[in-house]
């Protein structure tokens, strides 16, 4: 099995973000005022993370491949090189049909994502009062998708996995493992709002290729029952598709290559739909000079 790159960041509403009622010059909301932020919980030791995978392995042969996927996902802080790639997001504020295209160069360094060279509909955008990372997050509302897989398997999440189910994805045979993470155990996926922040409970599925055992799809869902009744977002769904890419001299890596995100708001505020593409992967290099 090739190395799985599954560390992500998701954003919800932050203080200072624009309100949903604010409009851009084109008559569409400039920002939802919401950010979903997903970052890897790296507080566990290597031994504690190994224990999470061993617990799956101890459940019997049906969970052997899932345990192997767990091993690779939790080894990412030690095995995944620093990367640079392009993220492209097609954003729609439903029920409107207009699509905006936001793109940025992403530097994935030491398990954290940094965004630069942000464009909106092909034009360079930004703010002198905001970093590229903050501006991209405000426009897209969901960032750092490379951390979700790590958090699902993290020992701190205490994820409850169901027995496997056979699935077909396109022409590919796969094994699906449904899971659930209780709200009190979610320390890696935070929703930020103007005056509050929460860590929702969530559930979803991990899909493994029947032949190789590699992760081919990850889905995460939040329903109204997994958040407070006053939480501005009532439900959300994220889907990530994984594939092999060549990353320079680091060789082949198994990483997210596309995804979809749908977040819906309470009342009459509608939903934000995102279609994500990750491409042009290469290694991140830093050059250091010592000046006398």
Image (cartoon, helix red, strand yellow):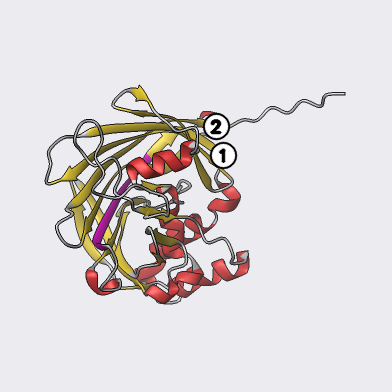
The prevailing secondary structure element of the residues shown in magenta is strand
Q: Which of 158 and 289 is in front in this view?
A: 289
Between the C-alphas of marks 2 and 1, the distance is: 6 Å
Work out whether residue 257 can be spotted.
Answer: no
Residue 215 is situated, as x and y percent measured from the top left of the image, at 36, 52
User: Which quadrant of the structure image shows residue 237?
Assistant: bottom left
Comes first in the chain, label 2 or label 1: 1
Q: Does the magenta stretch include residue 235?
A: yes
Which residue is labeled 2 in the image?
Answer: 283
The boundaries of the magenta stretch are 233-243
- In terms of secondary structure, where does tag 1 sit? loop
Q: Is residue 35 magenta?
A: no
Circles 2, 1 touching at the beta carbon (< 8 Å): yes
Work out whether residue 180 can be spotted.
Answer: yes
Q: Nearer the viewer, residue 186 or 140?
A: 140
User: Which quadrant of the structure image shows residue 220?
Assistant: bottom left
- In terms of secondary structure, where does tag 2 sit? strand
Residue 180 is situated, as x and y percent measured from the top left of the image, at 33, 71
Q: Nearer the viewer, residue 46 or 56?
A: 46
Which residue is labeled 1 in the image?
Answer: 82
Horizontal side of 106 relative to 27 (left or right) equals right
The local crowd at label 1, few if under 14, some if 14 to 19, many if 20 or more residues have their Cα within 10 Å, is some
**Residue 184 vertical placement versus 289 (above, below):** below
Horizontal side of 107 relative to 190 (left or right) equals right
Q: Residue at x 42, y 50 (%)?
A: 16
């Amino acid at each position: 099995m090739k190395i799985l790159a599954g560390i992500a960041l998701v954003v919800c509403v932050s203080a200072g973000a624009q309100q949903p009622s604010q409009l851009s010059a084109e008559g569409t909301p400039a920002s939802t005022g919401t950010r979903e932020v997903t970052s890897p919980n790296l507080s566990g030791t290597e031994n504690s993370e190994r224990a999470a995978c061993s617990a799956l392995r101890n459940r019997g042969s049906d969970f052997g491949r899932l345990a192997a996927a767990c091993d690779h996902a939790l080894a990412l802080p030690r095995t995944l090189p620093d990367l640079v790639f392009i993220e492209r997001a097609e954003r729609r504020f439903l029920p409107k049909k207009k699509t905006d295209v936001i793109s940025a160069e992403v530097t994935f360094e030491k398990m954290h994502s940094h965004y630069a060279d942000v464009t909106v509909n092909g034009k360079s955008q930004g703010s002198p009062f905001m970093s590229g990372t903050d501006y991209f997050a405000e426009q897209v509302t969901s960032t750092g998708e490379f951390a979700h897989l790590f958090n699902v398997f993290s020992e701190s999440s205490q994820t409850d996995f169901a027995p496997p189910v056979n699935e077909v994805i396109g022409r590919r045979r796969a094994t699906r493992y449904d899971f659930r993470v209780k709200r009190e155990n979610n320390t890696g996926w935070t929703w930020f709002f103007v005056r509050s922040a929460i860590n929702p409970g969530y559930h979803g599925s991990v899909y493994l290729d029947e032949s190789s055992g590699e992760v081919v799809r990850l889905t995460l869902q939040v329903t109204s029952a997994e958040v407070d009744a006053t939480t501005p977002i009532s439900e959300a769904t994220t889907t990530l598709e994984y594939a092999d890419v060549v990353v320079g001299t680091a060789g082949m890596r198994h990483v997210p290559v596309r995804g979809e995100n749908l977040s819906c708001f309470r009342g009459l505020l509608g939903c934000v739909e995102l279609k994500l593409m990750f491409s042009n992967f290469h290694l991140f290099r830093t050059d250091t000079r010592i000046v006398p």
